[in-house]
Image (cartoon, helix red, strand yellow):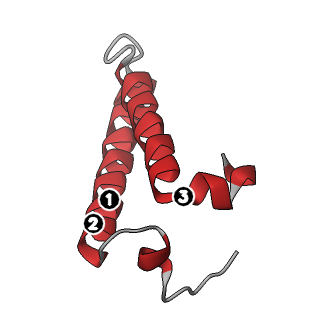
Amino acid sequence: MKLIDFKHTKTVGETYWQHLSWCIYATGVFVVMIVLSIVHGIFPFLLANLPDRVLTDFVNKFRARRQRTGQAERYPEQS
C-alpha cells in the first residue's frame, strides 16, 4: 500500500473535487457518529437505533464506492 500516490484520483476514476467531496462526506458521518454515540452511550433510551442505521448506511455506500472505483478489486483483503 502506498502512502503517497499522485495518480490516486486517476486510478479510482474520480476528479479531485469528487474525491474531496466523498472525503468531506465521510468526515461528516464520523463527526455525527461521535455525537450520536456519546448521547446514546449516556442516555441509552435516546436514539436507540440511530447510530446503527447511520453507520450501516455509510458502510453500504462505502462498499458500493469501493466497487465503483475498483478499489475492492485492487485491494480485496480490505473488503
Label 1 environment density (alpha carbons within 10 Å; few <14, some 14–19, many ≥20) = few
Q: Earlier in the sequence, mark 2 or mark 3?
A: 2
76 relative to 31 in the view: left or right: right
Up the image or down, 17 lies above or below 56; here it is below
Check the picture and name the quadrant holding the N terminus. Answer: bottom right
63 relative to 24 in the view: left or right: right
Tag 2–tag 1 contact (CB < 8 Å): yes
Which mark, residue 43? none
Q: Which residue is mark 3?
A: 70
4 relative to 57 in the view: left or right: right
Q: Closer to the camera, 14 or 19?
A: 14
Query: What is the C-alpha distance between the residues marked 2 and 3?
Result: 15 Å
Number of on-image labels? 3
**Label 1: which secondary element:** helix
Tag 2–tag 3 contact (CB < 8 Å): no
x and y percent of residue 2 in the render? 66, 80
Q: Which residue is mark 2?
A: 18
Query: What is the C-alpha distance between the residues marked 2 and 1?
Result: 6 Å
Amino acid type, residue under disc 2 in the picture: Gln
x and y percent of residue 42 in the render? 41, 25
Q: Which residue is mark 1?
A: 22
Amino acid type, residue under disc 1 in the picture: Trp
Label 3 environment density (alpha carbons within 10 Å; few <14, some 14–19, many ≥20) = some
Residue at position x 51%, y 48% from top? 67
Residue at position x 49%, y 85% from top? 7
Amino acid type, residue under disc 3 in the picture: Gly
